[in-house]
Amino acid sequence: MRKIPITLAAAAAVLPLLAACQSTGTTAAKPSALAAGPSSSTTPSATAYDPKIDPATFTTTITNPYFPLKPGTKAIYDGTKDGVPQHVEVSVLPTTRTILGVRCVVVSDVVTSKKALAEKTTDWYAQDAQGSVWYFGEDSKDYTNGVVTSTHGTWEAGVDNAKPGIIMQADPRPGDFYRQEYRPKVAEDIAKIIHLYATLRLPARTYTEVLVTEDRDPLNPDLIQHKSYAPGIGMIKTERLGNNHHELLQLTKTVAG
């Protein structure tokens, strides 16, 4: 499914177009003490996936350097999908939602194509005691001519056997796989860290220690996304590859809360 989780610093300025990402090598990180251990060096197993959620260990204060969420902030992305211009606005709302007893930050994601509403999604996140950011679900709607045409991909942890996943690890390590979301036959995205401490060379500046993930959807094997996250800023680029489709979005502006 298409989702652009917001990750930004409140004072971040307008970013120029992004250049190619290349690795500058990696350094071993501390093992991550995840609440349910859904991270491994092999592809996650759906049958064995059963995270244990203790609400007392979660917070809505999300400070993970690669995925900070401050209420009132907004990220604006621009790019194209199969050659058609796309505009995405992702806002961290001042409200919360309780899921499985966990208070979650609410994030709104609105996509327009040729100035027409194409998709509207609400996502729910919380951070555990170790600093990993968990994804508790999304309410996703596709639009055509102002009318909802699909809610496919919608899921909420605790409903229809859906379980939360991790959207950003506390201690990411190259080669790690982790499950981002899980609702059988609806939402089963997984991610693999392919670069840590990579470099993104931009026209105005160079970003270092960039985290790059490869996101895959087992329900749609042709869907592959590469996402780049800058420390202290968050996601700055996402690119979809495969099956003759191409989608590229880049962070172009942030608005402080």
Image (tube, rainbow, N blue to C red):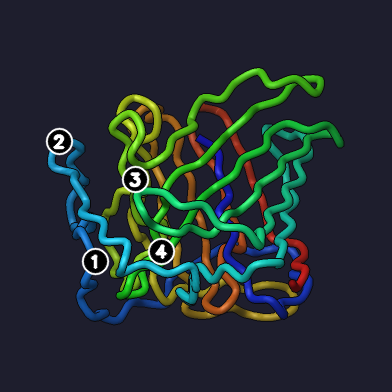
The residue at 65%/67% (across/down) is 71
Work out how far the residue at label 4 is from the one at label 1, CA to CA, in angstroms.
10 Å
Q: Residues within 10 Å of mark 4 (few under 14, many from 20)?
A: many
Q: Where 224 sits versus 4, above or below? A: above
Secondary element under disc 4, as helix, strand or loop, is strand
Residue position for label 1: 34
Disc 4 residue type (three-letter): Val
- The label on residue 133 is 4
> CB of mark 1 within 8 Å of CB of mark 3?
no
Secondary element under disc 2, as helix, strand or loop, is loop
Residue position for label 2: 47
The residue at 54%/71% (across/down) is 68
Q: Which quarter of the picture shows residue 31?
A: bottom left
**Which label sits in the foreground, 3 or 4?**
4
Work out how far the residue at label 1 is from the one at label 3, CA to CA, in angstroms.
16 Å
Task: Pick whichever of labels 3 and 4 is earlier in the sequence.
Answer: 4
The residue at 40%/67% (across/down) is 127
Task: Pick whichever of labels 4 and 1 is earlier in the sequence.
Answer: 1
Q: Nearer the viewer, residue 212 or 61?
A: 61
Task: Pick whichever of labels 1 and 2 is earlier in the sequence.
Answer: 1
Residue position for label 3: 190
Q: Residues within 10 Å of mark 3 (few under 14, many from 20)?
A: many
Work out how far the residue at label 1 is from the one at label 2, CA to CA, in angstroms.
19 Å
Secondary element under disc 1, as helix, strand or loop, is loop
> CB of mark 1 within 8 Å of CB of mark 2?
no
Task: Pick whichever of labels 1 and 3 is earlier in the sequence.
Answer: 1
**Viewed as shown, does residue 225 lie left or right of 221?**
right
